[in-house]
Image (cartoon, coloured by chain):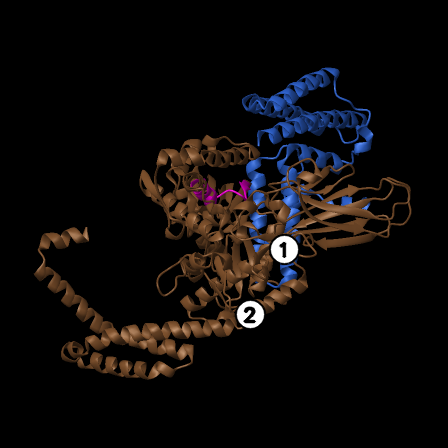
Chain colours: A blue, B brown
């Protein structure tokens, strides 16, 4: 386990970006573009097996870092890990009853739409889920902003915010799973 | 951008160009990068398309390309076309496709790999594709006047939606054809390269690629010379062949109703019917109605039927709608709306069908690019990529994605995704698993590709076993599985129990692939006499060509002696003498030299003759008519 943690390294550092939840998409794309021009295996096509394999390796890591940072959820997870906040500390965090009720209702509707193959309704739900997801991401953004204002020594407040972020992430993951379900029915 | 100098790497000596090959379902092409642009190579008759057809003759010889297509009318049962539809597939994957193939298909002994049965021969689709690839090499050798053995490096295009097994099988085909594949490029991405769209900074581009047998759609974003693929989707069982099938079935049903004959039961009639359907389809792209004609005097069938566009469009509409569904999926995956797309590019011969153009234009609300020949654009893009890899095109880079998710079967027949679809490649990802039984010493890894939730609905890429795990309680072992997907989209899987460091690894080939021994055997077969055959053919072609020029010169020898300047006349005379003596010349290079010299030397005569024709044309016909002909 320890070994695999080390391998993951810091995706922000790999792409030369500041370690923060707020990432400007243009900066991220540009950082990845510049690194790709340098490390893509196509640049080493005639450079011999060893150099090419090294490039494949390097590029795979760059792509992984890009994928993590591009996705706000994975980006948030990476930040939690980098800040030393482990998954196991959050088992007691659960979503609000309101959220759970809302989700259960939605899930029932989706299941029915899928059964009846109501494509238009499903498309609308897909859109709706996306909006809900963005709302949650905004909340995460605010939480990370708060975190930055807290002194690094104030462990209690930090832990509280971490837990709050973790709960929001759980909710998003739930939204995402439902959205993927819809997405599959749309194909 | 320049390449980073690396220690210990020899400077590259000038080498033969890297071939850019479009290995298509119906036709294949080969192109190279030349100074400022891609050039599609042609034969001496000026043909660029090489029909992807191979005929296996009774005497064990084989013919490829146009010659094979010509033969297929005479001997359909000895001819293989559309091998690309079978590559990397097992018989059980083919389903309803099976019934439409003109040749029987069966699983190879020992593994579930579809093989083509031609008489007592059993051919793998990779083997057939290898012959087509060899033909593209020969074409290049001829057009570039380089020895075949020097043209051994290539960029080969594959449908973006090809899965790992299909890519592996294509790579095997290249191996059998003696080609070192420097990169497999996805067809739509190659097309975007050919259009030189990298100049369109910041734009989002859709490439809609409908070929003979496959459909791909890719969405990409252009950033200062970089083509970043955002998402891709497709269908490896949808193409122009399916449009033909609508017309084939139409004729078949009507003929059967009238005469009681089942033309589909006979391979020769089926092949003839297919060609009739294709002719009608092509005609319908140019005119609003066309005749579907099928004659067979032996069976007393004379069928002619008028088909109008309306009827044809109705017939293929469900297929067109399927392609638009995929377009919608690509947009959803990239979180974009149709109106946010800046450019639309149409690729593949089937996009000549007017309905396709209308449908795509309507869907995206903008007029698609069609400037480049849709048959050639993929090969041109492959040549651009060859230029990039060879270091002659410096300002372009492709960042592609994997079209299908990759994962591992979990307990209960589910799938755990390890690399999701549309991940940029090369990619690497790890996932941890554990055991379910106390003291379990082995774990079976079943590698899958696809989007479905159950393992049985996904494409099985292979299985391997991680053995030797020391006894531990269930749930305690940590089995880390690492997927590595290279820039060609080829997968390697490694598993390790991290507590005991027991590991196992496979390059995914076993289930649908060929073993190394099989490839070696095919390699040997493909190359037996290939070299000699090729030399002999070129020699024969050159001698025919020489004969033709000699005859033309002979006819005008008197005129030449009277009207050519002395120096030109002397050079021509000498060249003609050399050419006359060349009848026995065995060395192809020398023969080519003689041919070139004769052509050069006869140029002043040709000019003389052309002027004369122009003068006489002006004298004999009125000026008006001459202008008409010209306009």
Badge 2 is on which residue?
Answer: B527
Q: Are marks 2 and 1 on the same chain?
A: no
Chain under numbered label 2: B
State which quadrant residue A41 falls in. bottom right
Q: Nearer the viewer, mark 2 or mark 1?
A: 2
Above-or-below relation of B539 to B623: below
Inspect this view and state whether residue B102 appears.
yes
Residue range (magenta):
B233-248
Residue B29, horizontal then vertical, whole percent: 45, 57
For residue B374, the mark is none
**B573 and B462: which one is in front?**
B462
Q: Residue at x 55, y 24 (%)?
A: A119
Q: Residues within 10 Å of mark 2 (few under 14, many from 20)?
A: some
Q: Is residue B239 magenta?
A: yes
Above-or-below relation of B342 to B158: above
Q: Is residue B125 magenta?
A: no
Above-or-below relation of B529 to B297: below
Q: Residue at x 55, y 45 (%)?
A: B99
Q: Residues within 10 Å of mark 1 (few under 14, many from 20)?
A: many
Residue B178, horizontal then vertical, whole percent: 56, 66
**B248 and B337: which one is in front?**
B248
Inspect this view and state whether residue B202 appears.
no
Badge 1 is on which residue?
Answer: A55
**B227 and B183: which one is in front?**
B183
Residue A140, horizontal then vertical, whole percent: 67, 26
Whether residue B576 sits left or right of residue B142 in the image: it is left
Secondary structure under the numbered disc 2 in the rendered image? helix
Residue B142, horizontal then vertical, whole percent: 42, 68
State which quadrant residue B516 falls in. bottom right
Whether residue B535 sits left or right of residue B125 in the image: it is left
């Amino acid at each position: 386990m320890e070994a695999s943690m080390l391998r993951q390294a810091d995706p922000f550092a790999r792409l030369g970006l500041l370690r923060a939840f707020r990432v400007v998409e243009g900066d991220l794309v540009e950082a990845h573009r510049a690194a790709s021009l340098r490390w893509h295996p196509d640049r080493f096509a005639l450079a011999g097996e060893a150099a090419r394999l090294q490039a494949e390796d390097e590029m795979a890591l760059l792509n992984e870092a890009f994928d993590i940072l591009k996705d706000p959820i994975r980006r948030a997870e990476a930040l939690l890990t980098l800040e030393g906040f482990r998954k196991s500390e959050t088992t007691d965090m659960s979503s609000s009853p309101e959220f759970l009720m809302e989700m259960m209702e939605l899930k029932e509707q989706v299941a029915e739409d899928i059964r009846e193959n109501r494509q238009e309704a499903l498309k609308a739900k897909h859109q709706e889920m996306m909006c809900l997801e963005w709302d949650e991401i905004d909340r995460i953004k605010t939480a990370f902003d708060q975190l930055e204002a807290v002194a690094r020594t104030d462990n209690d407040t930090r832990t509280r915010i971490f837990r709050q972020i973790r709960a929001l992430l759980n909710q998003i993951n739930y939204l995402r799973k439902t959205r993927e379900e819809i997405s599959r029915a749309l194909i | 951008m320049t390449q980073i100098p690396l220690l210990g790497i020899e400077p590259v000596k000038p080498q033969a160009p890297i071939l850019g090959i479009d290995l298509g379902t119906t036709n294949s092409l080969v192109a190279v990068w030349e100074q400022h642009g891609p050039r599609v190579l042609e034969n001496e008759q000026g043909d660029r398309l090489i029909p992807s057809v191979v005929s296996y003759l009774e005497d064990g010889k084989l013919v490829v390309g146009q010659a094979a297509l010509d033969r297929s009318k005479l001997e359909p049962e000895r001819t293989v076309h559309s091998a690309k539809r079978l590559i990397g597939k097992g018989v059980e994957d083919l389903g309803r496709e099976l019934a439409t193939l003109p040749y029987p298909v069966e699983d190879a002994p020992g593994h579930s790999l579809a093989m083509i049965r031609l008489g007592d021969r059993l051919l793998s689709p990779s083997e057939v594709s290898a012959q087509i690839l060899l033909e593209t090499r020969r074409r290049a050798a001829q057009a570039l006047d380089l020895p075949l053995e020097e043209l051994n490096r290539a960029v080969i295009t594959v449908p973006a939606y090809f899965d790992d097994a299909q890519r592996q099988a294509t790579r095997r085909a290249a191996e059998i054809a003696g080609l070192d594949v420097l990169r497999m490029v996805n067809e739509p991405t190659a097309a975007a390269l050919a259009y030189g769209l990298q100049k369109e900074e910041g734009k989002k581009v859709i490439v809609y690629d409908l070929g003979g047998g496959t459909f791909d759609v890719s969405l990409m974003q252009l950033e200062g010379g970089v083509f970043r693929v955002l998402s891709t989707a497709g269908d490896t069982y949808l193409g122009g062949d399916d449009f033909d099938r609508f017309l084939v079935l139409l004729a078949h049903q009507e003929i059967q109703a009238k005469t009681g004959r089942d033309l589909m039961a006979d391979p020769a009639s089926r092949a003839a019917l297919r060609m009739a359907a294709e002719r009608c389809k092509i005609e319908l792209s140019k005119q609003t109605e066309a005749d579907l004609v099928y004659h067979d005097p032996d069976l007393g069938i004379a069928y002619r039927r008028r088909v109008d566009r309306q009827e044809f469009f109705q017939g293929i509409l469900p297929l067109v709608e399927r392609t638009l569904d995929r377009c919608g999926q690509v947009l959803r995956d990239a979180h974009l709306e149709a109106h946010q797309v800046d450019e639309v590019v149409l690729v593949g011969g089937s996009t000549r069908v007017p309905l396709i153009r209308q449908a795509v234009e309507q869907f995206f609300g903008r007029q698609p690019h069609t400037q480049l020949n849709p048959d050639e654009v993929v090969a041109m893009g492959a040549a651009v990529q060859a230029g990039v890899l060879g270091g002659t095109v410096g300002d372009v880079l492709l960042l592609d994605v994997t079209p299908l998710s990759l994962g591992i079967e979990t307990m209960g027949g589910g799938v755990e995704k390890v690399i999701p679809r549309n991940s940029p490649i090369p990619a690497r990802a790890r996932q941890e698993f554990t055991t379910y039984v106390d003291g379990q010493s082995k774990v079976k890894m079943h590698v899958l590709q696809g989007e479905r939730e159950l393992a049985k609905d996904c494409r099985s890429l292979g299985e391997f076993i991680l053995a030797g795990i020391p006894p531990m309680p269930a749930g305690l072992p940590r089995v880390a599985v690492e997927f590595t997907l290279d820039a060609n989209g080829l997968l390697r899987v490694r598993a390790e129990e991290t507590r005991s460091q027991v590991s196992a690894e496979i390059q995914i080939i076993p289930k649908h692939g060929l073993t190394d021994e099989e490839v070696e055997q095919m390699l040997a077969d493909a190359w037996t006499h290939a070299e000699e055959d090729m030399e002999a053919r070129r020699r024969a072609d050159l001698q025919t060509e020489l004969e033709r020029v000699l005859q033309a010169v002979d006819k005008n020898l008197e005129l030449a002696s009277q009207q050519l300047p002395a120096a030109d006349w002397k050079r021509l005379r000498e060249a003609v003498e050399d050419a006359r003596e060349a009848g026995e010349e065995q060395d192809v290079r020398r023969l080519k030299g003689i041919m070139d010299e004769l052509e050069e030397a006869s140029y002043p005569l040709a000019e003389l003759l052309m002027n004369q024709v122009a003068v006489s044309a002006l004298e004999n016909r009125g000026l008006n008519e001459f202008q008409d002909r010209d306009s």
